[in-house]
């Protein structure tokens, strides 16, 4: 369906869908959607619209005035807000975007969970999967082959991905804190229980995420850090091997020597004497 609105260019498309009674009662449902190309005359201002809006900017920029605040939405950012609250959004440049108006099921609860984590403007880490879901919904509407259950699944997937990407981002931030902690304290006794606690993860999930992020298990990472420092001390100081073993955090000189040889194929003494 073509649109005759100020600022909406002829290449734009608008879709309307009426879900059945079962879907309205039990599923996420879509009611309006579109792919818009707009110039700077595009403006929407409402006091109430009984839907939630997901809007993905493809290129250009949109400005949102919402809840007594102003937000800029740029390319590869997602806009999510409750249209029942007075709002105004408009193009500040020529813009292309895709959007869906949805409601139903646990929309309110999931929306509130997401907005506790973000402003209405959400940077996308799972951009490809979210775009696939939006494209799937728009394709069904475009070809007039809408499955309400499929629509509900895709909306739930989008909202779940938004929650998941925050958890992933938080996990990465926590892992970076753990890595910084290890780097600064590698000579101290470190156990996986304390490191997992620092990352706010179970031991199982911490170990998996740490290895995925660094390529090493937590234990391997600590050993590499200790050996790296040991190499520096062997080359740049006259401390005894026993003393260096203690300084970098090994439980005994024999453990240090065995571990050093396993990783470098040289004993600490051979490493110290070797001319690189």
Image (spheres, helix red, strand yellow):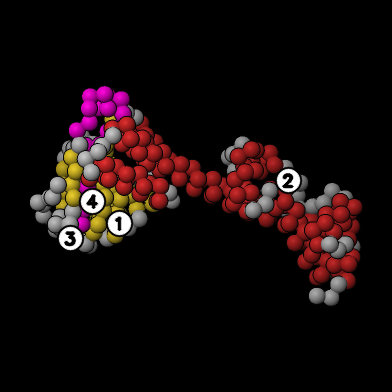
- How many residues crowd mark 2 within 10 Å: few (<14), some (14–19), many (20+)? some
Viewer-proximal residue, 52 or 139?
139
**Which residue, given by chain and number where applicable, does mark 1 sit on?**
58
**Which residue, given by chain and number where applicable, does mark 4 sit on?**
35
**Which residue, given by chain and number where applicable, does mark 2 sit on?**
190
User: Any mark on residue 39, and which?
Assistant: 3
Q: Give the vertical position of 46 relative to 266 (above or below).
A: above
Please provide percent x and percent y for residue 130: 37, 46
Of label 2 and label 3, which has the lower sequence position? 3
Label 1 secondary element: strand
Q: Distance between the residues labelled 1 and 2?
A: 47 Å
- Give the foreground label among 2 and 3: 3
Viewer-proximal residue, 273 or 13?
13
Are discs 2 and 4 less than 8 Å apart at CB?
Answer: no
Are discs 1 and 3 less than 8 Å apart at CB?
Answer: no
Q: Is residue 266 left or right of residue 17?
A: right
């Amino acid at each position: 369906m073509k649109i005759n609105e100020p600022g909406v260019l002829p290449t734009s498309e608008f879709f309307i869908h009426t879900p059945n009674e079962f879907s309205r009662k039990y599923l996420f449902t879509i009611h309006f959607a579109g792919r818009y190309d707009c110039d700077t005359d595009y403006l929407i201002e409402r006091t109430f619209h009984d839907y939630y809006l997901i809007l993905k900017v493809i290129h250009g920029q949109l400005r949102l005035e919402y809840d007594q605040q102003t937000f800029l939405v740029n390319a590869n950012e997602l806009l999510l807000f409750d249209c029942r609250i007075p709002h105004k959004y408009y193009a500040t440049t020529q813009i292309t975007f895709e959007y869906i108006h949805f409601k139903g099921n646990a929309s309110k609860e999931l929306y509130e969970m997401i907005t506790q984590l973000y402003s209405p403007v959400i940077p996308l880490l799972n951009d490809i999967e979210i775009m696939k879901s939006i494209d799937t919904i728009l394709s069904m509407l475009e070809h007039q082959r809408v499955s309400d259950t499929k629509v509900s699944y895709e909306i739930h997937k989008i909202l779940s991905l938004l929650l998941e990407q925050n958890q992933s981002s938080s996990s990465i931030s926590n892992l970076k804190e753990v890595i910084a902690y290890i780097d600064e304290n590698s000579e101290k006794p470190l156990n996986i229980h304390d490191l997992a606690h620092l990352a706010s993860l179970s031991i199982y999930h911490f170990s998996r995420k740490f290895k995925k992020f660094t390529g090493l298990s937590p234990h391997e990472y600590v050993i590499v850090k200790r050996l790296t420092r040991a190499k520096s001390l062997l080359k740049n100081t006259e401390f005894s091997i026993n003393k260096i073993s203690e300084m970098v955090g090994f439980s005994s000189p024999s453990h240090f020597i065995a571990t050093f040889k396993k990783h470098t194929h040289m004993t600490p003494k051979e490493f110290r004497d070797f001319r690189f």
